[in-house]
Image: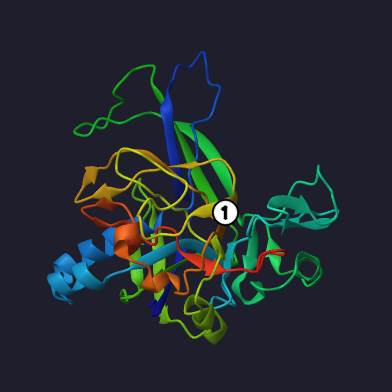
Amino acid sequence: MFKYLITINPLGLMYGSAGAFLSPENLVGRSGAKFPPEAATLSGLMFSINKITEKFPKEELSANLFVAGPFWAKLKDKQNFYIPIPWNKIIAKKAVDEWKFKNGKWQLENKSEKLEPDYRWQSINSWEITPKILKSNQSVAENPWKYVSFLHPKIKATERCVENSDGLFLENSVQMADDTCLVYLSTYPIENGWYRFGGENHIVEIECEEIKNKKFLNLLNQPIKRTFALITPATWGSNRLSYRHPQHETFPETLEMLTDKPVPYRYRAKGNLGRGRYAVPAGSVYVLAEPLNKPWCEWHEAWFPKEGYSLKRVGCGLCLPIEIKGVA
């Protein structure tokens, strides 16, 4: 389904989130930070570019453009990019463990109840490797970015002066490691070049190449049976309600999940700010009552919520099959 690997290399800092105004006497606190940008940001950019260049017919792009992410990679090995580690694998600096499914309940194999994961990412080529080997061959990583907060005055749109004499604006920017870049998947290419991406007019360098990693392509096309893990956030339900799994009558019952707290999600359509909701975070693991026997690319769009069009088109709930000990 996905044919192109789109990499984004920030030229300096990238925008993470913006905070509220603070008074000079109370310069404390930090606004909530959200990074990397969702795949919908890339989708919007591609539609904007195509509106100018008219490289593809509008109807064709609207019907066939699918994007997914965010991921990241090392510049020297973009095809072996990093994806979220499934929650059934616990990989800490001091030890590793793994959740198994026994007698209808989750159990830790080594019973290390207080072990918290230190690593959140693993290379795509190591998807089916056990936690112990993952750690030993250095196929796992921490976030390759750090937040840099700084204060500056809010400038009026029509004048080069501040809106409030005592108003300061807190911006949470992000600094990527020099040898890394963000990665997204797409069914259509984008011209290489410099673009404004992620808000606040920060400039990035975007490059596009065909996906050549056959191991990853085979994973994408491998049928999902009873167990799978999300590699992108998933929003299920209507634009008013959020659920932990698809609500369509043809989707099998979800027996168990391994997940973290939900993450905020907001999708912009045609320049309008969509309704805020919550998404199941990437890395969440599902155990179904019955096998699906089809890869994510063949999932019905009716299983996904719609805001203008199905959120499947922006990579909602992209997942890969996994093996859970104790699940046939």
Q: Is residue 181 visible?
A: no
169 relative position to 143: left or right: left
Name the amino acid, label 1: Ser
Residue 135: percent from the left, percent from the top?
78, 65
184 relative position to 104: left or right: left
Question: The N terminus is located in which quarter?
Answer: bottom left
Residue 128, by quadrant, is: bottom right
Question: The C terminus is located in which quarter?
Answer: bottom right
Near-viewer residue (196 or 313): 313
Residue 258: percent from the left, percent from the top?
62, 50
- Density class for disc 1 (Cα within 10 Å; few <14, some 14-19, many ≥20) is many
Residue 95: percent from the left, percent from the top?
85, 55
187 relative position to 81: left or right: left
Q: Is residue 313 visible?
A: yes
Say which residue appears at 44% left-offset and 31% top-offset: 19
Say which residue appears at 81% left-offset and 42% top-offset: 114
Please say if 56 is above or below 201. below
Residue 286: percent from the left, percent from the top?
56, 57
Q: Which residue is mark 1?
A: 284
138 relative position to 125: left or right: right
In this picture the colour scheme is: rainbow
Residue 39, by quadrant, is: bottom left
Say which residue appears at 44% left-offset and 59% top-offset: 317
Say which residue appears at 22% left-offset and 66% top-offset: 49
